[in-house]
């Protein structure tokens, strides 16, 4: 039986290591119009961005090839493919200022035939939507733009590299805890297990933070491109209808739906003026956003 203070000691040891993963929050936003987020995490420096982009491109190509073999890859003339690429074409110009590398990315948008409610954007701008998210949620163009903006934001903010860096630091912390425990005469395997549990919970929190940041950045990109950011509310209301058995927020890598909706609403004052400008309309003349599913109330602002 391990001493009662071992878990606390190992957690402290690991937290010192994981503290390297805290993002730099200072940012000069005096000249920035729109949402304000901190600088990208220094942890992305532990994973070479160029290498990740090459790996992502290879994986993306392999995914498309497999989908082609299974006749699950949407052809270029498929209405949904045309629709997705049209929305991406409007979003991407407003995504570029968020990452200086993005202007050199070889952006791609493809549709995969699957009932999964999913979409992603790999490092380097490789975007994929599953037909399930379009068909099951009956996404409007505004809602597609919110999803796509969110996924693009993950790539722009280099969350993949950040998570890889944090994982490397977490693994180092576990090894350090085992060495420290062995030096003190404790069972290193128990120490590693406790430290690993602490690291896993920490990584979940980091992932939820990334999701929230991607929501916020994605809202701005969509708004600047002329897509209604209020669609983010109806999107997560739809998602809640089909994901009623989601895990508790503290055990999930994604914030709970209500949390996301509240966060989206909190940023309306920052993004709605951008949307009004894109639509060339006074803010007070923009009608409430109404989605295409019965039972979801119109979303207004203010």
Image: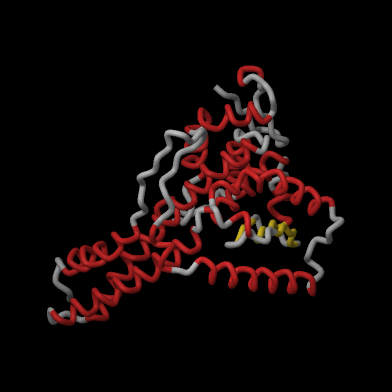
Question: In the image, 58: left or right of 83?
Answer: left
User: Residue 162 sits in which quadrant?
Assistant: bottom left
From the top left corner, tell me how far across and down residue 97 is, in percent: 56, 46
| Residue farthest to the right, as pictured | 77
From the top left corner, tell me how far across and down residue 135 is, in percent: 74, 50
Give the mark count: 0
Q: Is residue 250 above or below residue 140?
A: below
Residue depicted at 37% across the width and 65% down the height: 200
In which quadrant will I find the N terminus?
bottom left
From the top left corner, tell me how far across and down residue 265 is, in percent: 51, 32
Q: Is residue 74 above or below residue 58?
A: above
Nearer the observer, 43 or 181: 43
Can residue 248 be seen in this snapshot? no
In which quadrant will I find the C terminus?
top right
Residue depicted at 83% across the width and 59% down the height: 76
Task: Report the coloring of the rendering.
Answer: secondary structure
User: Residue 180 sits in which quadrant?
Assistant: bottom left
Residue depicted at 24% across the width and 78% down the height: 178
Question: In the image, 222: left or right of 160?
Answer: right
Question: In the image, 99: left or right of 43?
Answer: right
Can residue 172 be seen in this snapshot? yes
Nearer the observer, 12 or 295: 12
Residue depicted at 72% across the width and 57% down the height: 109
């Amino acid at each position: 039986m391990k001493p009662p203070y071992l878990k606390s000691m190992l957690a402290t040891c690991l937290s010192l290591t994981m503290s390297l993963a805290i993002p730099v929050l200072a940012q000069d936003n005096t000249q920035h119009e729109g949402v304000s987020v901190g600088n990208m995490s220094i942890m992305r420096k532990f994973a070479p961005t160029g290498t990740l982009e090459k790996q992502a491109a290879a994986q993306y190509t392999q995914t498309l090839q497999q989908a082609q073999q299974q006749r699950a890859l949407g052809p270029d003339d498929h209405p949904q493919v045309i629709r997705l690429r049209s929305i991406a074409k409007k979003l991407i110009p407003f995504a570029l200022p968020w990452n200086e590398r993005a202007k050199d990315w070889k952006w791609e948008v493809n549709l995969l035939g699957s009932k999964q409610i999913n979409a992603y954007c790999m490092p380097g701008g490789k975007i994929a939507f599953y037909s399930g998210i379009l068909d099951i949620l009956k996404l409007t163009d505004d809602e597609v733009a919110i999803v796509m903006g969110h996924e693009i934001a993950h790539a722009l903010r280099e969350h993949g590299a950040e998570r890889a860096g944090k994982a490397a630091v977490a693994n180092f912390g576990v090894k350090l805890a085992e060495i420290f425990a062995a030096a003190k005469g404790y069972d290193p395997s128990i120490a590693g297990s406790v430290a690993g549990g602490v690291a896993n919970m920490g990584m979940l929190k980091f992932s939820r933070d990334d999701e929230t940041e991607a929501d916020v950045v994605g809202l701005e990109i969509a708004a600047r491109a002329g897509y209604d950011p209020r669609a983010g509310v109806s999107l997560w209301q739809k998602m809640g209808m089909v994901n009623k058995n989601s895990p508790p927020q503290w055990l999930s890598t994604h914030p709970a739906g209500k949390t996301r909706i509240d966060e989206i609403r909190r940023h309306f004052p920052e993004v709605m003026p951008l949307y009004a400008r894109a639509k060339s309309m006074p803010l007070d003349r923009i009608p409430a956003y109404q989605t295409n599913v019965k039972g979801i109330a119109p979303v207004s602002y203010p």
